[in-house]
Image (cartoon, coloured by chain):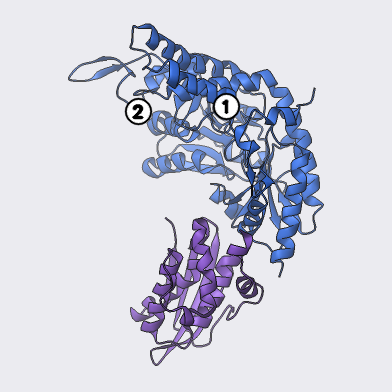
C-alpha cells in the first residue's frame, strides 16, 4: 500500500522540491489555496510573458503528496502557453478521478501520481497545486493579480 | 484488579481482524469506539424478537419495545447518576448541544448578555452557540489556555467579573489535548458571578472514560454520545435538570412529543418525551443500555485506572522517539487518553498513512477543533486515543510505525 501511494519519484519531489520559493521576480499573479480538511496551505506565484507561463513558484505547508504534486506540476507547466497549461491541468484532474491520462508524456513526473486516485482522501492533496495554477491562470486572464481559494467541500 | 485485556478483546469482533497479515491496532476511540458483542446482541434481539414501535401499542410486543427503549434510558441515567426524567435521547452529542442552543440559549440570551466558552471546544459545542450569537447579538467570551494546555482560570475570573455571563458551554475532556477540565469548579465560579447563569457540559470524551456523576458536578446540561462509549452510532443524550426541561419549550416537534393536538395548536407531553419527536432509535437505546451495563460491570473506576496507566506508558513511549512532541498536559491527574502528537519534519497525514499501512489506526487532521488549532498555530495533528481494549502491547506497533515514518519521509 505504501509503495502504491508513495512512489520513489514522488518522494524525490517531496525531499527536493522544484521551483519552491517564497517570491517571484515580476510576478503577475499570487494565489493562496488551502485545504481545510488537512490544513494544507499553498502560495503560488505566476509570471506570464507572451502568453506563456514564464515563471511559476510555489511555497507552503502540507503533506508529502501535496508538496510533491506541486513540484511536479511546475516542471510540467513552465514554458507552456496558458491555454495549453489549462488543458494539461484538466488532464491531471481527470487522472485523479480515475481516467487514464491523455497526455502522459507532457505530465512528466505528474504521471507518477496516477496511483493516488486509489486513495480518495489523498486526491485533494495531489490536486492542490494543480488547482492553484489553474486558478492563477484564470485570475491572470480576468486581469486580476491576487485570489484566495478555500477548498471546502 | 487490573483489566484482563487479551480476554476482554475477544468480545470485540472488529479487533480480531488482520490487515495485510498484521494485527489491527485500534487507537482511534476518541473518534469512535469499538462495539462488544453484548451490544450487538441487544440490538439484534430487538429487530429479531421485539420489533414494533414504542409508547402507543397496547399489545405485548409494543410493551417489550417500550421496555427496551425506556430501559436504555434508565440504565444511562443510573450510569451518569442522573434522574431518568432528565435524560433526553438525541441522535448524537451534537444534537444534544443544539437542543440546548435552540431551546434555552436562543430563547434567553439577548444583545447585552454574554456567554462563556473556551478555545478548546469541539465544533459540536462551539458552532451551535456562535450561530445563535450571530442571530441574537450576544457576546461570546473564550477562556484561553495555559502553556500546558489547561484552561486558564484567572482568565475565566476576569471574563466573569462584570456579571454579564448567563451561560457557560465547556467540554469535560478535550478530544485533542486530553485535558480534563475542572467543570464543577467552573460551574461554581459562573454561579458566583451570576446566580441565574446555566452551565452546559459536553461530556462526549468523559462519559466513556471517567466515573461521572451529573448530580455531583452541579451543572445544568450534560451531553453524551453512544458511539464513543461502546454503544451504537445514531444515539446520544442530553442529561438535564428535570425542572429546567419542564420549563423549556421543545426543540423538534411532531409525533410522540405532544399531549393534545388541535387544528390550532398543541400542548406538550411530559419530560423527557416532550423533547423526543417522532419514532425514536429503539434498537440503539437497547444497544446503549447494554453498553452502559457492560461498562458498569467492568467498573468505571477500573476503566479510569487502566486509562491512567496506559496513557502514561504511551506518553513515555512517544516522547522517547526522537523528534516527537506531544500537545497537552502530561500530568495524568488532569488528562484523559487522547494524545495529540507531532513528528518533526513529517506531516500528520503522512504519519497517519504510514501507521495505517502497518495496521495502526490513528486520527489525523484538525479533529473538529479549528479554533484550538489556530490558537496552537497548528494545521493538523496526529492523535492516538486508547480505550479498555488497548494495552501496552499496542505501543510497539505505534512506535515502530512512527519511526518508519521518520526514516521514510525525513528530508
Q: Can you give x and y, in whole percent of width and height, for residue A48 in the image?
A: 43, 87
Mark 1 or mark 2, whichever is nearer to me:
2
| Residue A14 in view in this figure | yes
What residue is shown at x 57% (from left), y 27% (from top)?
B191
| Residue B331 in view in this figure | no
**Which residue is the extreme one toward the front?**
B21
Q: Which chain is blue?
A: B
Chain A: what color? Answer: purple
Pointer 1 chain = B
Q: Is residue B375 left or right of residue B333?
A: left
Q: Is residue B101 above or below residue B256?
A: below
The numbered disc on residue B281 is none
Q: Can you give x and y, in whole percent of width and height, for residue A131 in the image?
A: 44, 70
- The residue wearing badge 2 is B252
Q: Can you give x and y, in whole percent of width and height, for residue B265 in the image?
A: 22, 20
The numbered disc on residue B191 is 1
Q: Is residue A103 left or right of residue A25?
A: left
Q: Can you give x and y, in whole percent of width and height, for residue B49 in the image?
A: 44, 16
**Which residue is the extreme one toward the bottom?**
A50
Assign a secondary structure to mark 1: helix
What residue is shown at x 49% (from left), y 23% (from top)?
B43
Tell me if mark 1 has few (under 14), some (14-19) or many (20+) residues whose alpha carbon lies within 10 angstroms of its own.
some
Pointer 2 chain = B
Amino acid at each position: 500500500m505504501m509503495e502504491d501511494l508513495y512512489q520513489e519519484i514522488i518522494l524525490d519531489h517531496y525531499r527536493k522540491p522544484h521551483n519552491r520559493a517564497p517570491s517571484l521576480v515580476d510576478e503577475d499573479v499570487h494565489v493562496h489555496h488551502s485545504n481545510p480538511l488537512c490544513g494544507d496551505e499553498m502560495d503560488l506565484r505566476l509570471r506570464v510573458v507572451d502568453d506563456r507561463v514564464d515563471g511559476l513558484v510555489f511555497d507552503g505547508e502540507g503533506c508529502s503528496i501535496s508538496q510533491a504534486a506541486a513540484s511536479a506540476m511546475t516542471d510540467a507547466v513552465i514554458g507552456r502557453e496558458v491555454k495549453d497549461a489549462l488543458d494539461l491541468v484538466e488532464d491531471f484532474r481527470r487522472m485523479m478521478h480515475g481516467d487514464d491520462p491523455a497526455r502522459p508524456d507532457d505530465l512528466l513526473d505528474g504521471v507518477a501520481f496516477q496511483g493516488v486516485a486509489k486513495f480518495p482522501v489523498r486526491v485533494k492533496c495531489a490536486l492542490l497545486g494543480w488547482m492553484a495554477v489553474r486558478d492563477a491562470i484564470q485570475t491572470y486572464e480576468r486581469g486580476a493579480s491576487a485570489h484566495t481559494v478555500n477548498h471546502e467541500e | 484488579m487490573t483489566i484482563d485485556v487479551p480476554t476482554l478483546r475477544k468480545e470485540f469482533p472488529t479487533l480480531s481482524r488482520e490487515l495485510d497479515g498484521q494485527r489491527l491496532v485500534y487507537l482511534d476511540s476518541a473518534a469512535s469506539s469499538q462495539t462488544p458483542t453484548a451490544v450487538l446482541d441487544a440490538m439484534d434481539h430487538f429487530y429479531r424478537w421485539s420489533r414494533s414501535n414504542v409508547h402507543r401499542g397496547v399489545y405485548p410486543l409494543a410493551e417489550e419495545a417500550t421496555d427496551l427503549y425506556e430501559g436504555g434510558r434508565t440504565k444511562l441515567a443510573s450510569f451518569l447518576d442522573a434522574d431518568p426524567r432528565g435524560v433526553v435521547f438525541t441522535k448524537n452529542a451534537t444534537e444534544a448541544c443544539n437542543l440546548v442552543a435552540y431551546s434555552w440559549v436562543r430563547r434567553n440570551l439577548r444583545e447585552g448578555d454574554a456567554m462563556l466558552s473556551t478555545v478548546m471546544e469541539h465544533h459540536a459545542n462551539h458552532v451551535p452557540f456562535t450561530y445563535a450569537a450571530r442571530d441574537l447579538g450576544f457576546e461570546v467570551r473564550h477562556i484561553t489556555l495555559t502553556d500546558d494546555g489547561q484552561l486558564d482560570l484567572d482568565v475565566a475570573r476576569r471574563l466573569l467579573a462584570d456579571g454579564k455571563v448567563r451561560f457557560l458551554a465547556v467540554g469535560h475532556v478535550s478530544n485533542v489535548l486530553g485535558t480534563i477540565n475542572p467543570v464543577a469548579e467552573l460551574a461554581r465560579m459562573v454561579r458566583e458571578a451570576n446566580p441565574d447563569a446555566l452551565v452546559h457540559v459536553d461530556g462526549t470524551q468523559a462519559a466513556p472514560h471517567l466515573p461521572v456523576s451529573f448530580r455531583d458536578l452541579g451543572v445544568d446540561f450534560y451531553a453524551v454520545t453512544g458511539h464513543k462509549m461502546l454503544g451504537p452510532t445514531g444515539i446520544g443524550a442530553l442529561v438535564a435538570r428535570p425542572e429546567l426541561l419542564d420549563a423549556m419549550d421543545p426543540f423538534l416537534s411532531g409525533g410522540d412529543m405532544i399531549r393534545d393536538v388541535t387544528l390550532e395548536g398543541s400542548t406538550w407531553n411530559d419530560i423527557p418525551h416532550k423533547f423526543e419527536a417522532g419514532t425514536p432509535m429503539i434498537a440503539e437505546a437497547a444497544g446503549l443500555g447494554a453498553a452502559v451495563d457492560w461498562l458498569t460491570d467492568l467498573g468505571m473506576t477500573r476503566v479510569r485506572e487502566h486509562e491512567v496507566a496506559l496513557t502514561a506508558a504511551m506518553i513515555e513511549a512517544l516522547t522517547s522517539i526522537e523528534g516527537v512532541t506531544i500537545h497537552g498536559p502530561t500530568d495524568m491527574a488532569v488528562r484523559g487518553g487522547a494524545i495529540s502528537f507531532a513528528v518533526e519534519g513529517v506531516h500528520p497525514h503522512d504519519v497517519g498513512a504510514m501507521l495505517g499501512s502497518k495496521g495502526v489506526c490513528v486520527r489525523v487532521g484538525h479533529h473538529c477543533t479549528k479554533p484550538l488549532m489556530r490558537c496552537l498555530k497548528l494545521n493538523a495533528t496526529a492523535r492516538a486515543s486508547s480505550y479498555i481494549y488497548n494495552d501496552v502491547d499496542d505501543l510497539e506497533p505505534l512506535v515502530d510505525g512512527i519511526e518508519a515514518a521518520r526514516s521514510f519521509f525525513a528530508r
